[in-house]
């Protein structure tokens, strides 16, 4: 083997192998929508949550896990920040683009609104420089007028970024009155879903070259 060939072979071995993990795709989203279209959103007698509401929670959890797997692989050094942002963009494009027609339009629209905090928090975590004082952040968020969407989202996303970084939130801050939850409270519920997802992904990693 020539010296040049040996150098090239050595350089190739030193390059990190790319991951082939598929985090989310259009088919997965479409399958969820189809499942929800066939579900009943009227609770059965004696049941607090309807079949559709239970499926919707699973839907939300699935998307949250998909996004946070990207973050975990970034934390594990599998992705650069730029690669993580690009893959996060891909998932967000599927989840946040367009609405199904008919009865699901409002339901999915509400889901997309709650998931704003997921994608915004992930980006804020990747950028760094976020506040980690959860108690103060929750108090600040609750004091923001409902009409000031961007400011409230900024605070909720900061809480989400802190959770991704390892902070504990948000069960004790979530109101018991499910009928009178504001948008900020909805975002805290999603951040709690993120918190549970990060715990479940504590040992998650993907070997280079694996496909899913």
Image (cartoon, rainbow, N blue to C red):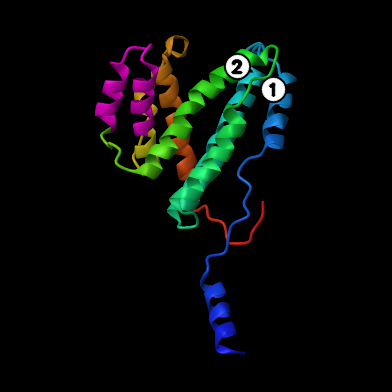
Q: Position of residue 205 (x, y in %)?
A: 53, 55
Mark 2: few, some, or many residues within 10 Å (few <14, many ≥20)? some
Residue range corresponding to the magenta coloring:
134-159
Number of numbered tags placed on the structure image: 2
Q: Label 1 belongs to which residue?
A: 36
Name the element at disc 2.
helix
Give yes or no for residue 142 being in the magenta stretch.
Answer: yes
Q: Residue 148 placed where, x, y %? A: 36, 15
- Horizontal and vertical percent for residue 86? 52, 44
Q: Is residue 72 left or right of residue 137?
A: right
| Residue under the image location 60 percent in, 20 percent down | 108
Residue visible at 43% across and 31% down?
191
Given residues 156 and 179, the one toward you in this image is: 156
- Among numbered discs 1 and 2, the one appearing first in the sequence: 1
Residue 121 magenta-highlighted: no
Q: Label 1 to label 2, Cα distance in Å?
A: 10 Å
Query: Residue 165 occupies which quadrant of the picture?
Result: top left
Q: Secondary structure at mark 1?
A: helix
Q: What is the chief secondary structure element of the magenta stretch?
A: helix
Closer-to-camera residue (23/84)? 84
Image spot of residue 126 (x, y percent): 40, 44
Q: Identify the image quadrant of the N terminus.
A: bottom right
Where on the picture, by quarter, is residue 99? top right
Can residue 115 be spotted in the picture?
yes
Q: Indicate left or right for 93 with 192 as reference.
A: right
Between 139 and 5, which is closer to the camera in this rendering?
Answer: 5
Label 1 crowd bin: few (<14), some (14–19), many (20+), radius 10 Å: many
Proximity of marks 1 and 2: CB atoms separated by less than 8 Å: yes
Q: Which residue is mark 2?
A: 107
Relative horizontal placement of residue 39, taking residue 209 as reference (left or right) = right
Give the residue at x 27% y 36%: 131
Q: Which residue corresponds to the image point at 44% horizontal and 29% vertical from the top-left?
A: 117
């Amino acid at each position: 083997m020539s010296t040049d060939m040996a150098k090239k072979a050595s350089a190739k071995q030193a390059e990190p192998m790319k991951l082939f993990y598929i985090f989310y795709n259009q088919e997965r989203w479409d399958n969820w929508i189809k499942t929800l279209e066939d579900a009943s959103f009227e609770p059965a007698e004696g049941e607090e949550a309807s079949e559709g509401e239970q499926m919707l929670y699973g839907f939300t959890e699935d998307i949250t896990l998909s996004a946070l797997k990207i973050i975990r692989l970034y934390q594990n050094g599998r992705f650069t920040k730029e690669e993580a942002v690009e893959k996060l963009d891909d998932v967000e494009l599927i989840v946040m683009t367009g609405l199904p027609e008919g009865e699901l339009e409002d339901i999915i629209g509400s889901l997309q609104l709650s998931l704003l905090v997921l994608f915004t928090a992930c980006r804020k975590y990747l950028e760094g420089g976020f506040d980690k004082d959860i108690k103060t952040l929750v108090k600040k968020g609750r004091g923001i007028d409902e009409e000031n969407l961007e400011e409230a989202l900024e605070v909720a996303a900061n809480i989400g970024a802190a959770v991704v970084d390892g902070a504990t939130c948000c069960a004790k801050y979530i109101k018991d009155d499910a009928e009178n939850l504001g948008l900020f409270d909805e975002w805290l519920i999603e951040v709690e879903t993120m918190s549970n997802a990060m715990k479940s992904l504590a040992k998650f990693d993907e070997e280079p070259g694996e496909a899913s």
